[in-house]
Image: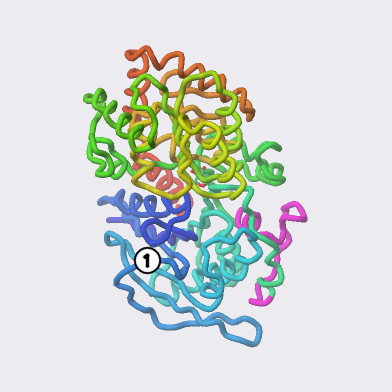
């Protein structure tokens, strides 16, 4: 007989409905990948729930019957819709608190508190209205973490079914703001927890506390959150929960990200026709208005302009490479100060460095296909997707030895790694790479090694499946 595991998967964003960053890639891919693992023995009925942000793009919306949740004397209406994605049911939860603040994320997390508390409350009510019961609630990051706390609070009620809670950690420093007053307004009490005192009122810690399993988005990050350096003040608590903590590396969409078929590229290539990649480099140089020369090293930075990503270190490193012949392209948006710094760099080296301060997915693909290397000097990196995409395109990653970067790049075999978050460490790593680059045979071996690695979602999804299985036993 086929056994079914029902999973309610909650996230603030999911591609193709709405995407701001890596969380959107993961939430768009993983739930479908999990469903695809279903076989005669086990069926995974994973369903996705998202806030109906004003910017969500969705077709075929079917309204569910209106319901509401009590907030003191008032009732807050939940306007939920159902749609689907490749056969997967997707629920969009709307209502006043979600409309009130249009953006997915605000710079000041306290502005998002009302929205995500409401979303978490409503998502936990949703099953009653769709005649379907989850065995597992799977939340992601602080925005949906409270659903696990609410789920646990429900479990305390007599006769309630055991619903397991899983929390995936994509970015620990973002914990949300004090939600004690909002929770109280919905009648949800704060429990006695073994969290540090300051954390007892924050969504992410409360979700961690309430979850049956915690998954970091790479084994490396799972180890790091236990340390003072990366544990954001929760490291001792995480050590207490060590038994329930694991690391599962994210995958990438290997169908979409495939240099052999990618429509954004003028010249497609694969591991056997790698020589043709050179044409993409020349086209990229031309597009950027840089000298068309196959021998000048071309470096790429494709990133959110954020100190987490260490782009400031990369800029200082490039500034320190005055006497070295290279070209560089910077693509991305973010912190205005860092955007300005990128612009200033282009002004300083107009025939070497180009700053393209915009979000441009097609252009990013052309950089992966044309640049010799990509720089990722992250201060911390829970997983990182760009280094995996780069390797698939034969673009050699130069990365800092943190989190998922350390787990995916093999030093001197698929890329270059440096230890210290200092621009001179990055310069040394770039120089080491540049030393090999003229040796075509050696460089192509690096490229081929990277292209041959399997970064598909399947292996990751299997690990989540095993986790669900263990939890619902
Ligand atoms: C966050 C992390 C990034 C990770 C992504 C998806 O954006 O910063 O490292 O790849 O989440 O899990």
Q: Residue at x 44, y 54 (%)?
A: 24
**Residue 189 falls within the magenta-colored stretch:** yes
Q: Is residue 440 left or right of residue 375?
A: left
**Residue 4 falls within the magenta-colored stretch:** no
Q: Is residue 225 above or below residue 429?
A: below
Q: Nearer the viewer, residue 155 or 407?
A: 407
Q: List x then y, in percent, for residue 180.
A: 71, 68
Q: Which quarter of the figure has residue 121?
A: bottom right
Which structural element holds mark 1? loop
Residue at the farthest bottom position: 73
Q: Which residues are magenta?
A: 185-208
Q: Is residue 148 left or right of residue 258?
A: right
Q: List x then y, in percent, for residue 189.
A: 69, 70
Q: Residue at x 34, y 18 (%)?
A: 445
Residue 158 in view in this figure: yes
Q: Is residue 451 above or below residue 18?
A: above
Residue 408 in view in this figure: no
Q: List x then y, in percent, for residue 43.
A: 31, 55
Q: Is residue 87 left or right of residue 342?
A: left
Q: Which quarter of the figure has residue 253?
A: top left
Total marks placed: 1
Q: What residue did someone put label 1 on?
A: 57
Say which quadrant the N terminus sits in: bottom left
Residue at the farthest right position: 197
Q: List x then y, in percent, for residue 71.
A: 62, 81
């Amino acid at each position: 007989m086929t056994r079914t595991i029902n999973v309610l998967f909650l996230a603030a964003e999911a591609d193709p409905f709405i995407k701001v960053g890596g969380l959107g890639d993961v939430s768009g891919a993983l739930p479908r990948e999990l469903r695809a693992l279903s076989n005669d023995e086990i069926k995974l009925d994973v369903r996705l729930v998202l806030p109906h942000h004003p910017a969500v793009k969705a077709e075929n919306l079917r309204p569910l019957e209106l319901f509401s949740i009590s907030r003191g004397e008032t009732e807050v209406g939940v306007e939920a819709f159902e749609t689907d994605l490749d056969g997967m049911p997707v629920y969009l939860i709307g209502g006043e608190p979600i409309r009130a603040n249009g953006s997915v994320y605000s710079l000041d997390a306290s502005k998002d508190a009302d929205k995500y508390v409401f979303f978490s409350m409503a998502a936990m009510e949703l099953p009653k209205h769709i005649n379907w019961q989850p065995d597992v609630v799977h939340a992601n990051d602080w925005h949906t973490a409270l659903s696990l706390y609410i789920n646990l609070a429900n479990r305390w009620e007599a006769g309630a079914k055991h619903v397991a809670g899983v929390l995936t950690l994509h970015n620990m420093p973002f914990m949300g703001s004090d939600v004690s007053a909002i929770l109280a307004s919905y009648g949800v009490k704060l429990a006695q927890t073994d969290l540090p005192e300051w954390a007892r009122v924050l969504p992410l810690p409360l979700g961690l506390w309430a979850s049956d399993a915690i998954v970091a988005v790479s084994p490396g990050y799972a180890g790091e959150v236990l340390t003072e350096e990366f544990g954001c003040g929760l490291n001792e608590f995480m050590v207490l929960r060590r038994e329930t903590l694991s690391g599962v590396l994210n995958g990438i969409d290997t169908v979409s990200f495939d240099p052999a078929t990618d429509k954004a590229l003028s010249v497609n290539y694969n591991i056997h026709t790698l020589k043709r990649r050179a044409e993409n480099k020349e086209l990229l140089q031309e597009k950027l208005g840089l000298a068309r020369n196959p021998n000048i090293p071309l470096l790429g930075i494709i990133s959110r302009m954020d100190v987490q990503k260490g782009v400031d270190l990369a800029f200082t490193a490039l500034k320190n490479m005055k006497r070295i012949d290279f070209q560089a392209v910077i693509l991305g948006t973010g912190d205005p100060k860092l955007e300005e710094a990128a612009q200033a760099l282009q002004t300083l080296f107009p025939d070497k460095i180009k700053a393209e301060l915009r979000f441009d997915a097609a252009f990013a693909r052309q950089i992966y296909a044309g640049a010799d290397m990509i720089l990722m000097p992250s201060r911390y990196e829970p997983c990182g997707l760009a280094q995996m995409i780069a390797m698939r395109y034969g673009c050699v990653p130069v990365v800092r030895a943190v989190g998922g970067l350390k787990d995916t790049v093999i030093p001197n075999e698929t890329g270059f790694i440096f230890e210290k978050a200092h621009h001179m460490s990055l310069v040394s790593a770039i120089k080491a790479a540049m030393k090999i680059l003229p040796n075509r045979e050696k460089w192509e071996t690096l490229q081929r090694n990277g292209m041959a690695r399997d970064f598909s979602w399947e292996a990751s999804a299997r690990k989540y499946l095993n986790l669900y299985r263990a939890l619902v036993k």
